[in-house]
Amino acid sequence: MHVITDNLSLYRDGLVTTLRICLYSGLLALLLGTIMAACRVSPLTPLRAVGTSWVTVFRNSPLLVVLFFMAFGLPELGINGTYFVFGTIGLALYTSAFVCEAIRSGINAVPPGQAEAARSVGLGFGQTLSLIVLPQAVRSVIPPLGSVMIAMIKNSAIVGAFGVGGDLFSVGENLTSAQGEAALPVLIGVMLGYLIITIPAGLLLGIVERKVAIAR
Amino acid sequence: MTEVSTDTPMIRLSAVDKYFGALHVLRDIDLEVPRGQVVVVLGPSGSGKSTLCRVINRLEPVDSGSIALDGVPLPAEGRALAELRADVGMVFQQFNLFAHKSILDNVTLGPIKVRKSGKAAARDEAMQLLERVGIADQADKYPAQLSGGQQQRAAIARALAMRPKVMLFDEPTSALDPEMVNEVLDVMTGLAADGMTMLVVSHEMGFARRAAHRVLFMADGEVAEDSVPEDFFQAPATDRAKDFLGKILTH
Ligand SMILES: Nc1ncnc2c1ncn2[C@@H]1O[C@H](COP(=O)(O)OP(=O)(O)O)[C@@H](O)[C@H]1O
Ligand SMILES: [Mg+2]
């Protein structure tokens, strides 16, 4: 196991890179997913079509294919960037489809009378959604959204392996193939790294869940 | 060519048809409700009473015909529709209070977000309304902490806070335990006495006799009878109404 202690700073840097990928992708995915969920429940047909297409494309494509599109498709359109930027955006796009569906199912769990009462009072679509429906949807959205986020953290390994490099997963790969370390202890270190992120994330989720449950 | 404004009916439906798929729910409805009139709508379940209420503030769009409120045709969507809905108070069978907001916030939300009233002014007015419906002491509680009768009175206060021109009630007492029915009907009777234009779907005959100027009996999506309460309850003109009254009078 000394391979872990010997390379602690490598592991640490990997952890930080993975966290950065997850933080940016997660925030972007939440933003895009919420917008798309709003589109999907909008009264306007074109917006609903946008939301539905978005989910259909990104939920049904393998992440790797989305990443290939980002890294090789975008430069052909004249959009350039680093692998980090492309990988992070690709992961965000992919994850946003799942975020959208989690939020939409939460919206559907709010009794329709709530939105009807809001509309009767004279609130517009955006106000009804943001003031009445979403705050009540949050409660049922947190658990599925948590699963989506934990899946995203694990998917960040694909982003790392795809070419970003320097993340937890790549550290492991580097140690085994380039430096010839035994695979098993290296991988145990990698797995510990992911658990350091995902287990607290899960705990945090439980706390948030209890918070929103109290705030009716 | 323009009518004198006091003659403009508060609610006017002309040749309104509404379908749910193949089901013809409102059949060629013509209805005028003058300002200040209290109309009680009754009829068997499924006859289209709720739908009639819901098309008036366009919670349901109609398939043909036109609806005007205070002389203004209902806008199709968007901001204009939202503005018009603000002038129509709606009270639901299931109250539909905003579950995540206190009673006070339920009442002030519309005035603040739609009418752009100041917070303090909205709060003062809300407290007066809650006083009027007898639940000022419940202002800081959440809907789930109130009894059904209290919730429905809060819902009425929420609608009144918008200073509506018309109030629509869809079976406001049907979900209540019997001992809470009167506290809600008393509030409604008070509103009627104050001259509010009201369309009330309800089978409460006491309320109809006491407060209504007019009774509509609906059957199969049509207004089968349109008369005054005394006439309707003593001598309904149609067999369907006789049959219906026979059924509700037995319990
Ligand atoms: N959203 C809907 N979709 C399909 N059918 C509906 C819907 N709302 C009401 N209906 C049907 O329309 C008819 C009239 O309903 P409603 O207006 O609620 O009657 P009432 O209030 O008199 O009981 C009923 O047959 C009902 O099943
Ligand atoms: Mg009904």
Image (tube, rainbow, N blue to C red):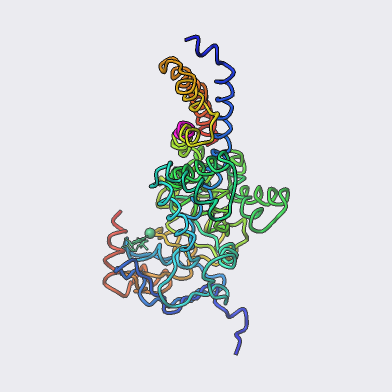
Residue A16 at x, y percent in the picture: 59, 27
What kind of secondary structure does the magenta stretch mostly adopt?
helix
Residue most extreme to the top: A2
- Vertical placement of A35 versus B234: above or below? above
Residue at figure coordinates x 61%, y 39% from the top left: B140
Residue at figure coordinates x 57%, y 29% from the top left: A17
Range covered by the magenta-colored residues = A150-156
> Can residue B148 be seen in this snapshot?
no
Q: In which quadrant of this rendering is ligand 1 seen?
A: bottom left
Residue A34 lies left or right of residue B128; in this view the side is left
Q: Quadrant of residue B31?
A: bottom left
Q: Nearer the viewer, residue A18 or A117?
A: A18
Q: Nearer the viewer, residue B195 or B87?
A: B87
Residue B44 at x, y percent in the picture: 31, 63
- Vertical placement of B233 versus A88: above or below? below
- Vertical placement of A99 versus A3: above or below? below
- Vertical placement of A172 versus B122: above or below? above
Q: Nearer the viewer, residue A15 or A125?
A: A15
